[in-house]
Every structure is written in structure tokens, then in C-alpha cells.
Amino acid sequence: MIAIFVAFVLSFVLYALSYLLITKKQDVEKNSAYECGFDPFEDARNKFDVRFYLVAILFIIFDLEITFLFPWATVLSQSEIFGFWSMMAFLIILTIGFVYEWKKGALEWE
């Protein structure tokens, strides 16, 4: 119970100190457009271009597929020939999907 109390008090004190000690002047970089290309203080109902969502979805898909490679690479020496060729089939399908996206122009930015 003492540790919970100390943690609560310490977190409150650190939060209060960070709020009191920060500098509150605006910076040009903080007010600039960030990643999405829109000014941060405009109307929140601006329409986003579909390409932002497409890039995000493609990143998530390929990122998740690449994470399958790490456990496979750690057990590659212990896996049999079936494990090797099943991953090769997975990588071929992944490559076909990537080439398809490339040919469709999903990776092009105007």
C-alpha cells in the first residue's frame, strides 16, 4: 500500500513539475504541417486524400507479413524442408502482391 501511495504522489509531483516548468512559447516547427500536409489548426472536418489511408494500410499489411519472418528465421535450422518451402510460397505470394500494387500505381505519389 505504501508503494502505491508513493507511486501516486511521485507521479502527481512529476506531472505538476512538468506542467510548471515547460516553456509555453510557440515554435514554428510545432505549428507547421506534419505528415498529412494539412495545417494543424484548420477545420478538423477537412477531407483526407485516400492515398494517405492506402499508404497506411499497405504499410500495416507488409509490416505484419514481415513479422512472420522473424520467428521463421530463428527456427530455420531446426525446421524441415516443408517449413522452408512453405515460407518460400508465402514470400512468392507476398512478392506477387507487391508487384500487383506497383503495377496498379498504388505506390505512386502525385
Image (cartoon, rainbow, N blue to C red):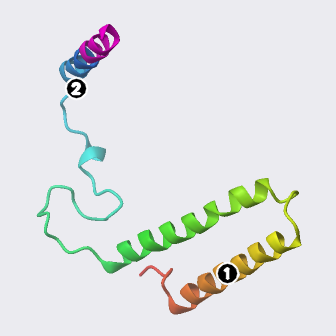
The answer to whether residue 61 is above or below residue 17 is below
The answer to whether residue 7 is above or below residue 99 is above
Q: Earlier in the sequence, mark 2 or mark 1?
A: 2
What type is the residue that disc 1 sits on?
A: Thr
Picture residue at 32% right of the left edge, 56% below the top:
34
Residue 45 left/right relative to 5: left
Give neighbour class at mark 1: few <14, some 14-19, many 20+ (Cα, 10 Å).
Answer: few
In percent of width and height, residue 47 lies at 20, 75
Query: Which residues are the magenta region?
Result: 1-10
The answer to whether residue 35 is above or below residue 88 is above
Per the image, the residue denoted by label 1 is 95
Q: Nearer the viewer, residue 37 or 4?
A: 4
In percent of width and height, residue 75 lies at 80, 56
In which quadrant of the rendered image does the N terminus lie? top left
Q: Main secondary structure of the magenta part?
A: helix
What type is the residue that disc 2 sits on?
A: Thr
In percent of width and height, residue 86 lies at 76, 76
> Was residue 91 drawn as part of the magenta stretch in this picture?
no
Residue 56 left/right relative to 37: right
Dot 2: element = loop
Give neighbour class at mark 2: few <14, some 14-19, many 20+ (Cα, 10 Å).
Answer: few
Q: Quadrant of residue 46?
A: bottom left
- For this orientation, the residue located farthest to the top is 2
Picture residue at 26% right of the left edge, 73% below the top:
48
Kindly report the distance in space between the C-alpha atoms of the residues bearing marks 2 and 1: 49 Å
Dot 1: element = helix
Q: In this rendering, which labeled residue sits more in front, label 2 or label 1?
A: 1
Per the image, the residue denoted by label 2 is 23
Q: Nearer the viewer, residue 13 or 82?
A: 82
Q: Nearer the viewer, residue 102 or 90?
A: 90
